[in-house]
């Protein structure tokens, strides 16, 4: 029997290509081209299509994975087969997942198995290539009911075959769960992720397979909804590795009213993505840290000019240099904030807690912000009952950063002549602080955005800053085990709160609240 398959074979060993040529000729494959150089093979592919492309893995000029990747770029529908030795098996499996190679065959191969894989590869390519043609044929028969039913039936079969091919070759894990959260089936990528065959995965519960501390699976497996979940891990039972993944969950409706639906989970390995994110964050942190030195040097140099060390300045020169100094100081503040954010996110910043008088800290913050408020003719008042007895155990500098940020925002976004109130409350061993203004306010729909990194304003364009201040404030309060939140509405002012829980107050007091 003759086969009109278009096949290309590449191996830098001429004995191998000669052997394959004989085998394929005997089996009835007439259109076979063989190459010992990957570059000659690519030149051929530039002008000639192929259904099946077979390549050796280890070659001097170019390895098989690179060659097959380039070949797939030229003919995406072609099926690719990788010939590999036993020692290269792990790399071959990775190539299948990452590059989309159809199959790998170990050397020395079984001739019957090789022929079967070539035929299956051709069928796969043919199915993919003919899918659009079949869809067009279906539309041509739309005017004839009987023919349409027959053609649609054939199309469904072909689509199922196509879907099976896509699922089996998908790099992401795909697992179907029943309504009671038990595995029904899984694709090869899912088997590789868990290190378990489909048979061993079947009937395992979702709780057994995933490590998700804050995920309520009953809220994920909800009919007629789609869910996307991050911060989940799975454990590969073969090597014991913890693999971070992202999951998309979709509901599959039942075929009849008497049956319950099922759920399909698409599982993506994000380990490489997280490594790249860490590298990017480390690079930004290093670059930001290196910017501190020239910024500090510029501030010091400008200070020499302004204090007369380098000679007397006229009024205009002093004004310009002072403006430059303030700009450099603002830049240094931004650099320091970026570094603080990075340290909190990477877990590298340790709180330096000590026992201190909280009322003195509030007075210090007010003294720093008062000139800004006075420049806008604003009133800045503090209310704190029994301040002499409030000793707290916390990181004084970090809490000072939070209070200064909240007060500074209140001054910035309150009109001239407005009012700002700093309040404090001790309740047992808890401490609550709030900063209230009667400024422009914030839309309720924008409130959840404000504590996110790089959130630059709202519908009312309240902020034009980097959006790091409130984000860092939340990181600091979270690190203290506390909570921070906001109550506001458009044109009704804003009130920011933070709460330090439990042992923050060193000495318990009766419940007090500044009114």
Image (cartoon, rainbow, N blue to C red):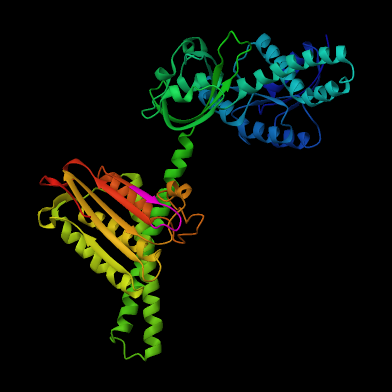
Tell me what residue is drawn at x 33 percent, y 54 percent.
340
Q: Can residue 251 be spotted in the picture?
A: yes
Q: Nearer the viewer, residue 203 or 356?
A: 356
Q: Can residue 19 be spotted in the picture?
A: no
Tell me what residue is drawn at x 39 percent, y 63 percent.
291
Q: Nearer the viewer, residue 177 or 416?
A: 416
Relative placement, left or right, of 118 versus 373 is right
Placement of 68 over or under 176, stated as above or below = below
Q: In which quadrant of the rendered image does the C terminus lie? A: bottom left
Placement of 151 over or under 453, stated as above or below = above
Placement of 182 over or under 419, stated as above or below = above
Q: Nearer the viewer, residue 341 or 254?
A: 254
x, y (%) of residue 413? 41, 63
Q: Magenta span covers which residues? A: 485-493
x, y (%) of residue 7? 76, 23
Query: Residue 493 occupies which quadrant of the picture?
Result: bottom left
**Residue 489 magenta-highlighted:** yes
Tell me what residue is drawn at x 46 percent, y 53 percent.
455
Relative placement, left or right, of 15 versus 86 is right
Q: Nearer the viewer, residue 87 or 398?
A: 398
How many numbered marks, from 0 up?
0
Q: In which quadrant of the rendered image does the N terminus lie? A: top right
Query: Residue 134 occupies which quadrant of the picture?
Result: top right
x, y (%) of residue 204? 44, 13
x, y (%) of residue 383? 21, 59
**Residue 193 magenta-highlighted:** no
Most distant residue in the front direction? 515
């Amino acid at each position: 029997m003759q086969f009109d398959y278009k096949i290309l074979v590449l191996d830098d060993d001429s004995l191998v290509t000669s052997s394959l040529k004989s085998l394929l000729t005997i089996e009835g494959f007439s259109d076979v081209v063989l190459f010992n150089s990957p570059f000659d093979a690519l030149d051929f592919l530039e002008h000639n299509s192929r259904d099946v492309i077979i390549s050796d893995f280890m070659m001097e000029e170019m390895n098989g994975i690179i060659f097959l990747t380039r070949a797939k770029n030229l003919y995406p529908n072609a099926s690719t087969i990788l010939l590999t030795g036993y020692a290269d098996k792990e790399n071959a499996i990775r190539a299948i997942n990452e590059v989309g190679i159809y199959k790998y065959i170990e050397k020395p191969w079984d001739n019957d198995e090789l022929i079967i894989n070539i035929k299956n590869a051709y069928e796969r390519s043919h199915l993919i290539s003919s899918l659009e043609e079949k869809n067009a044929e279906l539309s041509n028969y739309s005017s004839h009911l009987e023919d349409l039913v027959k053609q649609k039936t054939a199309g469904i079969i072909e689509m199922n075959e196509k879907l099976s091919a896509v699922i089996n070759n998908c790099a992401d894990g795909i697992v179907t769960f029943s309504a009671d959260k038990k595995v029904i089936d899984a694709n090869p990528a899912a088997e590789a992720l868990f290190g378990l065959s489909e048979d061993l995965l079947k009937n395992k519960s979702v709780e057994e397979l995933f490590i998700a501390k804050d995920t309520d699976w009953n809220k994920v497996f909800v009919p007629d909804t789609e869910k996307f979940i991050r911060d989940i891990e799975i454990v590969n039972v073969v090597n014991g590795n913890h693999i971070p993944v992202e999951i998309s969950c979709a509901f599959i409706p039942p075929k009849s009213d008497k049956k319950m639906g099922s759920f399909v989970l698409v599982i993506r390995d994000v380990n490489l993505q997280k490594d790249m994110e860490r590298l990017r964050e480390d690079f930004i942190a290093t670059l930001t840290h290196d910017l501190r030195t020239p910024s500090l040097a510029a501030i010091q140099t400008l200070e020499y000019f302004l204090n007369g060390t380098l000679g007397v300045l006229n009024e205009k020169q002093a004004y310009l240099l002072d403006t430059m100094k303030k700009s450099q100081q603002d830049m240094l503040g931004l650099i320091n904030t970026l570094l603080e954010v990075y340290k909190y996110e990477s877990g590298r910043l340790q709180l330096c807690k000590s026992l201190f008088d909280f009322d003195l800290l509030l007075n210090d913050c007010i003294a720093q912000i008062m000139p800004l408020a006075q420049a806008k003719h604003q009133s800045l008042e503090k209310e704190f009952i029994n301040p002499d007895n409030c000793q707290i155990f916390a990181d004084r500098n970090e809490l000072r950063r939070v209070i200064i940020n909240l007060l500074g925002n209140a001054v910035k976004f309150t009109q001239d002549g407005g009012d700002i109130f700093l309040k404090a409350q001790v309740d047992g061993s808890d401490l609550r602080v709030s900063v209230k203004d009667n400024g422009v306010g914030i839309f309720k729909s924008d409130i959840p955005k404000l504590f996110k990194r790089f959130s630059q304003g709202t519908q009312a364009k309240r902020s034009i800053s980097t959006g790091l201040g409130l984000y860092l404030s939340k990181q600091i309060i979270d690190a203290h085990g506390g909570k921070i939140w906001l109550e506001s509405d458009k044109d009704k002012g804003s009130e920011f709160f933070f709460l330090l829980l439990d042992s923050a107050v060193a000495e318990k007091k009766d419940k007090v609240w500044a009114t």
